[in-house]
Every structure is written in structure tokens, then in C-alpha cells.
Amino acid sequence: MRGVRWRRVASQVGRSVAVWAVSTVTLLLLAGILPDFRLRSADGDSATDIAVTAAFGAGAFGLLSAVVWPLLVRLLLLVPALVLGLLVFFLNGALLLLALRLNPAERGAAAPETAVVVAAVMSAVASATGAALAVRDDEAYRRRLYRLSDRRRRSGPPSPSSPGTVFVQLDGVGHDVLLDAVAKGLMPTVARWLDHGDGGRSTHRLTPWRTDWSSQTGASQLGILHGSNHDVPAFRWYEKDTREVVVCNRPTSAAELQRRAVGYAGHGGLLAVDGASRGNLFSGGAEQQALVLSIAARRRSRENRSRAGYFAYFSDPANAVRTALSFVADVGREIGQSTRARLRKQRPRVSRAGLYPFVRAFATVVERDVVVASVTGDMLVGRTAVYADLVAYDEVAHHSGPASRDAQKVLEKLDRSLALIENVAEHAPRPYRIVVLSDHGQSPGETFRSRYGLTLGDLVRAGCGLPVPRGAERTRSGAEARAAVRAALRIPVEEGGERHRPARRPEPIVLASGNLGLVSFPDVAHRMSKEEIDARHPALLPTLANHPGIGFLLVRSDEHGGVVLGANGAEIPLAGLDDDPGPLAAFGPGAADAVRRTHSFPHTADIMVNSFHDPADGEVLAFEEQIGSHGGLGGAQGRPFLLSPLVLSAPVADGEELVGAEHVHRVLRRWLRESNGPQVPLESSEERAA
């Protein structure tokens, strides 16, 4: 045993010396290349003196990075996470200047801007060298993984021997998109789990499920994590009783929706027992929360750890530099891809200028790296249940298209993240079952505005006899990554063009959620009926129903309770949709049930508008500026997936369908019960039967 310990020590010392040697050589090369960086005195030195100076500088820089950097990050806890990420280069440069000053011979100097470059290269080289040397050393790799969560592991209780469960949500990845990526070889980890092409045995099963009418993260994730998405009619909607616009990715709205869901469901959530929530809109009842939007609106406190994951990740200078460099590279990649699309005049296309390259890089690099690091840390301390959301694909697909080359590149990187999580599971203190799922898919199609030259708001105003602006206004996109960026920067998530508390006026409020539109009249306190709308604006409903870009409308009816309206005077009572689906026929099975459920919500809009859908190619027309959209009915957006280990029971019996986020929640809770015994609160008899 003692011999093994000494071999480990010798191996660690050998790797440290090797990293030191490579860093020294790197420093010598940079001194020869960069004009404002030198490793000798002004009078000149021998080659030996220069080498000793380089070795001392490399060693001092490595030591300062290991000792000073975590303390420096701790002192900067009040700095917004993204600002801290941008400070990485400058702080590293300062450490290098300090390392050179520590040389007793006072050799070596660098201009401040050059020091930033040298420090970044040094950190990257040291990290790459250490990782390369540890590749064939399983014990070293295990120790390196354990260091990701060393502080939490020491403070946490011993892990039980029963299996833990990791739920990884690939935001916006549809069932068919996943299968296509596997077939093309873009996701080898998922392919191996499903036994696609390598002749091995399957370890997972793939199950499609059907979303509710509101096919977006707010409704789906709330239902999955908290067991209820009752009264969530869309991504954003107007509530007449509070006179507020609720937006799922606004922290204050997310907190309120979570509170309501807990009340409806009667329990804290999926993660209430030793759980961790990472990168989600909602907490799921987890005690451990990081990058969770629903707690981002609170004052900073011990209970508010929404940004803690950023600081834990960036406290490692190698992580910080690697992510910062990848961030810059992805910004450049997006600029190049968007420029190529513009020069080729690709259609459909939306604007990808302004801050979008940085928002995309945040989603595809920063958020992914931090969330994956948080998940691996949770596994290494043995948490019972972890739920994490990776939003990278969803953000890119909104602007590049669900099947675009840009989006496929993101799927490759997400698969590597799954491989890393799988690798960490082998070194965790308890066995883990990895469940991968999505909250919705995405449907392709150009925007309503680009096809018809006006927004849904313009069409509603025309139907009401109100003046329409000469220049149609651009409807903002409400992708999840933008809210995550704002939360990281501690900027209130308020939607441009939407008043948080609109005044009561006769003009309608028109809101968009992908290809789902909502029209509300704020000066009427109740949900208006078809008869009231016709009496007030006789041309409005016919104008909307007969427009070629609109598939159907849902309105309340004094005579029938609720009706679906379509082109050419189609008017089908909700009770008769099973016999005569009318305009819902193009939207496939389950559309009638989804519409009837939304009709029952207290805050359903006066007029619910679903865009046109072409079943032949799956196209919809987004009312937002998105060429890959979700939020309503039609196409792949309503068909996400659930990828589960075979050791868990089948999600549904043969011949049955998995319908709705609340049903998915019951399945996930059943799996936790199978792995770890009864959960708190105990399930009802109905849940046991699910």
C-alpha cells in the first residue's frame, strides 16, 4: 500500500515537473516572438541566465495561479459572472507581471497588454499539458475530476450505495433531430447507448413524447420539475387580474410560476430529496441551486445561489482561460457563419447582428461549460438527483434553423458533454443512471413578418380598424439564452417593447410565443367571448381566421363554451372536435385535447392564434424573429424525446403515448422511487399507476 502511495506521489511530481518544463519553453518562445516581452536584463544575459529566468517565471506564475487565483475570485464575488469572465485575461496578466517581479535578479519585463497575451497562452499550455499527461493515468484523471468539487465533497455527508440519477435536458432537440444526428454520426455517445452501428448492446431506450399546446421551456420544464404547468398558456401572456405581462424567462415571473406550480401540485418538486438544479428556469425543489432563473430575482443571500456555479468554475484559472478563448472563437465562428449565410442569400434568414454573436457564445460555451462542471461536481459528491439544462442547440437553431450545419455542430459538442458526464459517473462515489431528455423540439419556417410584410400585431390592428404603422415593427425573440445572459450580468430581464404593467386601454395587447399568438383587450376585466369580440370589432375574427398565415383561432363562446375558428367560416365547438377536427386536422393527433386543456386555464387570452402549419414539410410561421421556432402546435416542436437507461422501467406501456410535461414528471418520479425508495412526499395512487 505504501509503495502504491509513493508511486502516486512520484507520478504527480513527474507531471508537475513536465508541466513546469513545457511552461518554461513556452515562455522562452514567447519572449523570442513578442517585441514587448523580455526575459533578460537591459545589459544582456547569457543563455543560462535567460533560461533560469524563464524557469523561475514559469514556476512563480504556476504557483500564483494555484494559490492566489481562488482567493482573488473569492474577493470578486460581487462582480457579475460574465464580467468576471472578461476579467480573466487581465487578472492572469497581472499575475504574470507579479511573477516576473518576484525574480531576485530583477530580469524580465513585459508591457501590460503583452502580459495578458503571455498569461493566456501560459495557462492554456499548462492546462493542455497536464491533461495530456494524465490521459493514460486513470488514477490521475480521477483525482483531477475530484478536485472539481473538493470543497463540497469534504463538507457533504457520505454517499449511499443506491444509484443516483442525472437528468440532462438538451433544450430544443426534437426526437427526429436526435435520430438524424445519430444516423449522421454526429452523436457517437448517444449512438453507442442506442446500439446504432457499432454492433454492441443497447443500454438506453428512446421514447418520443408529446408536449402541451405551449411547446416551450417555461411550460415543459415547469411541468417536468414541479408536476404542474396548469395556467401556463404560452411563453408570455397578459393577466387581466394583475394587469401584468408574464414572461417565463423573466426572473420575477419564473419565481411566481414556480410558487403557483408548488401550490397546484402539492409538493416541492422532482428534486426535493437531495437534489441539485443547474442552469434551469425553475428549481424543482432542489436545495442545491446554481444558474437557476427563478431565484435570480431575489436579493443576494445564502439561499440565493443562482450565480454560484460561475464562481466555482472560474476559480480555476485553466477553466477560465479555456472557456474565455473558446468564447472568443465561437463569437468569430458565428460572425463567419452569418456572413456566409448573408452572402449566399440563404432563405429563410433572420438578423444575427448586434449582440447575438455574444449571446450565442454564452449559450454554446460559457453556459455549457459551467453547467457540465456543476453536474460533474454534483456526481462526485454523490447527490441523489441532478437536473441540468443545456440551451446551446435551442439558441443556435432559433437563428440558423433546426437542421442547419451550425446547429449540427452544436449537437456534436453536446454529445461530447454527455460523454464527459458518463466518464465522470465511472469515478463517482455511487452508481449513476443518466437520463437525457428534451423539453420540446423546433419547427422550421420563415417568419410571419418576412412572408407577409407585417407582424401579427399589425394584422390585429387592421382587423380592429386601428392605424397600422408604415414600417412593420420587428418582434423580439425570447430565447432562453438571453435571459441566462441577463441573469448572469444581474440585469433585470425585461422584454423590449413589452410594458410590464400595461395601462387599461381599448387597444389590444398582442404577444408572440413562437408560432403562437395571444390577443388580449386590457380594458375588459374578463375573458371576452366571440360574441363580445364580434360586437366590438366585427372584422377582427374573420380577418385573422381567413389570413393564409394563420391555422386556427381559439375563443370563448357564450353558446358553446369555446370554439375553434378557421378559414372560410369554419367554427367548431370544442366538444365536437373529436368528430370534426376542422382546422385542427393538419396539426395531428392530440391537438384537440391540447386546445381544450388550454381553454380551461384562467389566464388564457381573449384570442389564441396558432400559425399556419404545412404537414408535408413541417413548416410553421413564427410570430417572432426566428426561423426555428416553438411555442405552439405544428411539426417537430411538439415531439421531444426521453432517452432512459434500460435498467429503469419503461416510461409507458406498449401502445400508450407519453403526453404532456406533467406525465413526464410522474415517470421521472417513479424512476427516482425505483432507484432510491419512496420519495417525499409519497406519491398518490394515481401517480403509482402512471
Image: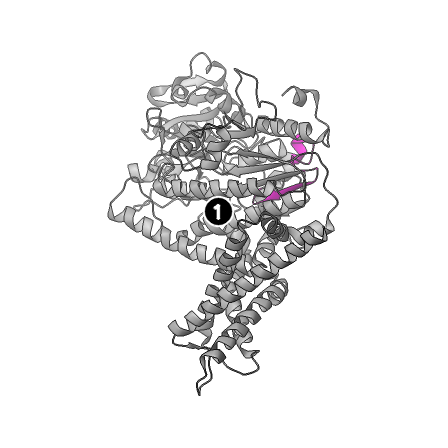
**Which of 52/79 is in front?**
52
- Give residue 181's position: percent from left, percent from top: 41, 34
Left or right: where does residue 341 sit relative to residue 685?
Answer: left
Q: Amino acid at mark 1?
A: Ala
* Crowd class of label 1 (few under 14; some 14 to 19; many from 20; radius 10 Å): many
Q: For the point 63% across and 62% down, which residue is it?
A: 74
Above or below — where is 597 with respect to 433?
above
Q: Which residue is outermost to the left?
A: 344
Instruction: Specify the quadrant that holds the C terminus.
Output: top right
Q: Give x and y (percent) for residue 215.
A: 48, 32
Q: Is residue 622 visible?
A: yes
Q: Main secondary structure of the magenta part?
A: loop
Q: Position of residue 454 (x, y in %)?
A: 32, 40
What residue occupies the far top of the structure in this picture? 579
Q: Is residue 246 something that shows in the picture?
A: no
Which of the pair 481/566 is nearer the observer? 481
Residue that mark 1 sits on: 481
Q: Quadrant of residue 327?
A: bottom left
- Secondary element under disc 1, as helix, strand or loop, is helix
Q: Furthest residue to the front?
A: 3
Q: Position of residue 512 (x, y in %)?
A: 43, 38
Identify the residue shown where x is 48% and y is 43%: 416
Residue 89 belongs to the span the image colors magenta: no
Image: magenta residue range: 262-281
